Image (tube, rainbow, N blue to C red):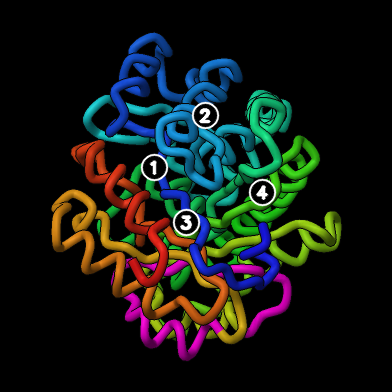
Amino acid sequence: MRALRGERSAIPPLWLMRQAGRYLPEYRELRAKAGGFLEFCYTPALAAEATLQPIRRFGFDAAILFSDILVIPDALGQRVRFVEGEGPRLDAVTDPAALASLTGDPSRLDAVLETAARVRGSLGPETAVIGFCGAPWTVASYMIAGKGTPDQAPIRLTAYRDADFLQAMIDRVIEASARYLVGQIDAGVDAVQIFESFGGALPPALFERWSFEPIMRLVRHVKHERPRARVIVFARGVGDRLTQFAAADGIDAIGLDWSIDPAWAAETLQPRRTVQGNLDPLALIAGGDALDAAVARIRGAFGEGPHIFNLGHGILPETPLAHVERLVARVRAPGNG
């Protein structure tokens, strides 16, 4: 939390995206008992346990709630399911009539808020709790396509063909997401992260309207309702457009994917905002000297300003536990790793 306030630390705080996940044997055992994935997310005792497992094993400086960005479409009334080996599937919403038919049930999210309260009550103040949601463009991409797509062509076509319909969908996602994030904060999370997974698919002419401005509307709403809230924006694949987020009021930290040059980010973004990231998840799988060199490079680049060490995307299931242990040791070693 000190890093999110812009304070520099000689040893950066550390957490990993998807740190509650399939690389952990204890998670796999828990997952086998949980039934469907959404049921897992909506069972506070199980979701809280999944959230706490990596903290117990590795002592990370923050826990991130075990949930999924697609709880928002589910709460809006869209049918969401997860197919083993294929990922999420939704009943696609492709026209105004289908959007209007989504009646919504915000109480669906109460279970996630209970998870947040359980996790906060289980951890001491030295460990932050991070909540999250998907960015409006990313969530709407799933809602329109009914699944993940390689280049987000369905929603990009919609942006060209029916901007009014897409705007109506984005507005609903913003409203539901803002209420959800405020609920997480009230339940005890210390910070929230907005995941823009697909913003990099947008051409420059569309980026402002469909990625940047919806995220900023969401940030402004949260900050208006809870001025002390801390907000991290992780916009993957957007390159130098991160400078727009760094210049915007209300954002406390900028997440960096692995494609971002740490030297550029240290010069361009870090003087304005705390930066978070950006180890390549494959370097963590590789381990050894490659991992050590990557950690040293990131720590060396960001050592003069506020930095939260993290991956440049989520940890992969095949990541060896010993490599995560080595990462923790290297990040927390004195000096530049």
In the image, what residue type sits under mark 4?
A: Ser
Q: CA distance from mark 1 to mark 4?
A: 19 Å
**Marks 1 and 2, Cα distance to the nearest angstrom?**
31 Å
Type of the residue with mark 3 = Thr
In the displayed structure, 111 sits above or below 137; it is above
Instruction: Name the spot of residue 210 as percent of width and height, x first.
Output: 54, 70
Residue 177, numbered circle: 4
Q: Secondary structure at mark 4?
A: helix
Q: Earlier in the sequence, mark 4 or mark 3?
A: 3
Which of the two labelled residues, at mark 1 and mark 3, occupies the earlier sequence position?
Answer: 3
Q: Nearer the viewer, mark 3 or mark 2?
A: 2
Q: Which residue is mark 1?
A: 146
Give the structural element (helix, strand or loop) at label 1.
loop
SS under mark 3: helix
For the question of whether residue 211 can be seen, the reply is no
Q: Is residue 297 above or below residue 38?
A: below
Give the quadrant of residue 189. top right
Amino acid type of the residue tagged 1 in the rendering: Gly
User: Which badge, 1 or 2, is on the more N-terminal residue?
Assistant: 2
Give the residue number, with chain letter if any, for mark 3.
138
The residue range painted magenta reads: 247-270
